[in-house]
Image (cartoon, grey):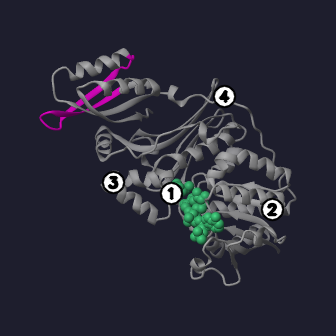
Amino acid sequence: MKNVSIALLGCGTVGKGVVDLLQMNGHLISEQTDTHIHIKHVLVRDIEKYKNVGLDENLHLTDNFKDIIEDDEVEIVVEVMGSADFAKACIEECFRRGKSVVSANKDVIADCGIGLLKLAQENGADFQFEASVAGGIPIIRPMYSSLNANQIEEIIGIMNGTTNYILTNMTDRGLTYEEALKEAQEKGYAEADPTSDVGGFDAARKIAILAKLGFHAYVNVKDVSIEGIEGVTKEDIAHATAMGYAIKLLAVAEKNTDGISLAVHPAFVPKDHPLANVGGAYNAVYVRGNCVGDVMLYGQGAGSLPTASAVVSDIMNVIQHINTEMTGKRPYLWHETAVKDAAENKAPYYIRLIAANAPGVLANMSGVFAKHGISIRSLIQKDETKEAAEIVILVDSTPCKTVRFALNEIEQLTCIHRICNAIRVIEV
Ligand code: NAP
Ligand code: HSE
């Protein structure tokens, strides 16, 4: 049996998961790869913190990346730190030294993935990042391998475990947003800075990565139109439930003849739609190929062992490439592709606002909708107080930007107290 020495950059939720998984399943992994995986170094910032977390005594804990990069015995470096600039610099240095890298770092891959893949190849190294999108769900490899005989037309999914955990638990257990976020952090789903989760940036990075691979396109996270879940209230959730919908944070990539559009936004999803039933920290990704049709992948999108499952599978893949002399040889295809403004995309909308409880309010408001060519599908009014009413409106499919223009105008009407929310509705 061969031996391969690896180093971990980071030993938090994911890094410790990798250590634990290799302990649990090491025998099966060695049998399949004919190789014993030896974790030689682990890089962290605060060594003291890691002295009593159950790491093997022979493993070398260090806070100095030089110990790893200068060790010729280390063939594979596993980057699970989460920082952006330092992680990217480490990955590049690994490639320059001919070391292969496995990473879970969507920040780096969403922004610089194509450049890093090219650098890896130039240096005869592998770069694998299955865990960067949807944790334990195999989606990266299907994107560039199992589904690569297709023209991919659409990718749509729930790709952030933290927000899905929050929305599910606000809906099912009546938790407040803050309570649900705290639980998601305690369970290790959330990013170090959870604004990245709740603001939609984490999902935006993931859809940018999938769009790169699925559409062979030079797209970046800056091409994604992003809305998070911070504005979703218990009132919106109650209305969605009463109307037969679940609110989900969706990441959507579409390709048609005039280009690609990329967006992350909350959406009303009909309860009988499979995505509406993806609960807790689970993720699901739908991919539509022009030959295969719809494929849905579902599983745990975050957490220690589920994410480690993807990371270790990548390590095994790199080992198989080493053993078959295929390292750095996989070709990738990239095209220049136009990116469309996602605000042009059409959808029906749920709109909630607070208005004066007075004659003429509905006439004024519907006048603005009519002026913008927006057709009202249904309207419910409920008195909040003697003076104010909550109005919930469903409008027919309209471009996002037209809804925004109309709402900006409606907000200026003296009879309107405030626009609370406008959320796209998914139709099956
Ligand atoms: P984490 O629990 O915060 O752990 C980060 C680890 O990296 C810690 O051991 C930390 O050491 C170390 N670290 C951070 N910056 C460092 C630096 N500059 N130098 C040396 N060590 C450094 O993070 P995580 O949840 O495991 O996430 C790691 C990566 O996986 C991120 O890119 C994340 O987006 C991705 N990911 C996470 C999940 C998940 O479910 N958590 C799922 C998929 C992908 P100290 O403790 O000493 O600071
Ligand atoms: N913070 C991320 C999530 C971790 O909640 O989905 C997995 O990428």
Q: Which residues are magenta?
A: 372-395
* Contact? badges 4 and 3 (CB < 8 Å): no
Q: CA distance from mark 4 to mark 2?
A: 34 Å
Residue 211 location, x and y as percent?
Answer: 64, 40
- What's the amino acid at mark 1? Asp
Question: Which residue, given by chain and number where applicable, does mark 1 sit on?
Answer: 193
Q: In percent of the image, x 28 and y 44: which residue is there?
A: 235
The majority secondary structure of the magenta stretch comes to strand
Q: Disc 4 marks which residue? A: 338
Q: Point out the tag, 4 or 3, that comes first from the N-terminus.
A: 3
Residue 172, label in figure: 3
The residue tagged with tag 4: helix, strand or loop? loop
**Which of label 2 and label 1 is nearer to you?**
1
The nearer-to-camera label among 2 and 3 is: 2
Upstream in the sequence, badge 2 or badge 3? 2
- Badge 1 crowding class, 10 Å Cα cut-off, few under 14, some 14 to 19, many 20 or more, is few
Q: Which residue is mark 2?
A: 99
Q: Is residue 346 magenta?
A: no
